[in-house]
Image (spheres, rainbow, N blue to C red):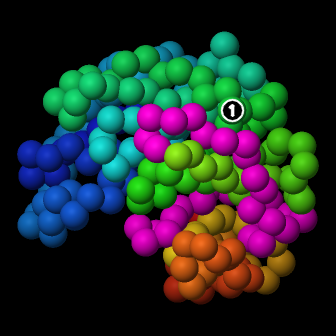
Amino acid sequence: MLLVAGACGRVNYDALADDAETDAAMDDCSMFTAPQLVAGVSTANSEFGPTLSPDGLQLFFHASRPEGLGSDDIYVSIRNSKDSDFGPGALVNELSTANADGAPELSGDGLTIYWSSQRDGGQGDGDIWFATRASLSAPFGPPTNLTSVNSPADETGPEISGDGLTLYFGSSRPGGTGAINVWRASRQDLGSGFGVPVLASSLNGIADI
């Protein structure tokens, strides 16, 4: 299931909205209201990893549901306005497979989505993939393996910075301090590929993330 908490009267879905108004509201206070169930989205099955489009009208998440293609799939729930409830989540077929697909993350403009997947064609047990779309109302294009950040180990949980230039993710690759650590990869501009990932040392310990 998915939960939501408001900050100073504003709703913040997993603190993933990147608009300046939300950021300003968060700067004014640090107390959240009690979490509430996102009723239109949540079911008796498992729903995780919400990411909100910049207009606040699309909520992507991964779920394990009977109608899915695999153990975990990517879903999207849509609402007509920020004052409306989200509708039931719909399977995003172009991003889901018979293997596990999860942890979706939208870019700041909502036109690129990153997620972790165990689909065929990857480099390891799980890889980071991405897909793009021409507008917020358009479907996503074919998934692409983010080869520059993946390894024969397991990569999961991508998080992209608001400017789209830094990607954080979890990986079990050698060189970490625990079984799974936070790594980051950067690029100079949106038209460039991500460079070689480096360990985000200040975010890691000896335990898993």
Q: Is residue 149 left or right of residue 190?
A: right
Residue 168 image position (x, y, % from top left): 58, 70
Residue type, mark 1 in image: Glu
| Segment tinted magenta in the rendering | 135-164
Q: Nearer the viewer, residue 29 or 191?
A: 191
Please, which residue is most extreme toward the front here? 134
**Which residue corresponds to the image point at 20% horizontal and 57% vertical from the top-left?**
22
Q: Would you say residue 51 is visible in this rendering?
A: no
User: Quadrant where the N terminus lies?
Assistant: top left
At mark 1, the secondary structure is: helix
- Specify whether residue 150 is painted magenta: yes
- Specify whether residue 126 is painted magenta: no
Above-or-below relation of 142 to 89: below
**Residue 148: which quarter of the image?**
bottom right
Residue 25 image position (x, y, % from top left): 13, 60
**Which residue does the numbered mark 1 point to in the structure image?**
94
Q: Is residue 109 left or right of residue 85?
A: right
**Residue 120: which quarter of the image?**
top right
**Which residue corresponds to the image point at 20% horizontal and 43% vertical from the top-left?**
11
Q: Would you say residue 20 is visible in this rendering?
A: yes
Q: Nearer the viewer, residue 139 or 128?
A: 139
**Which residue corresponds to the image point at 68% horizontal and 20% vertical from the top-left?**
68
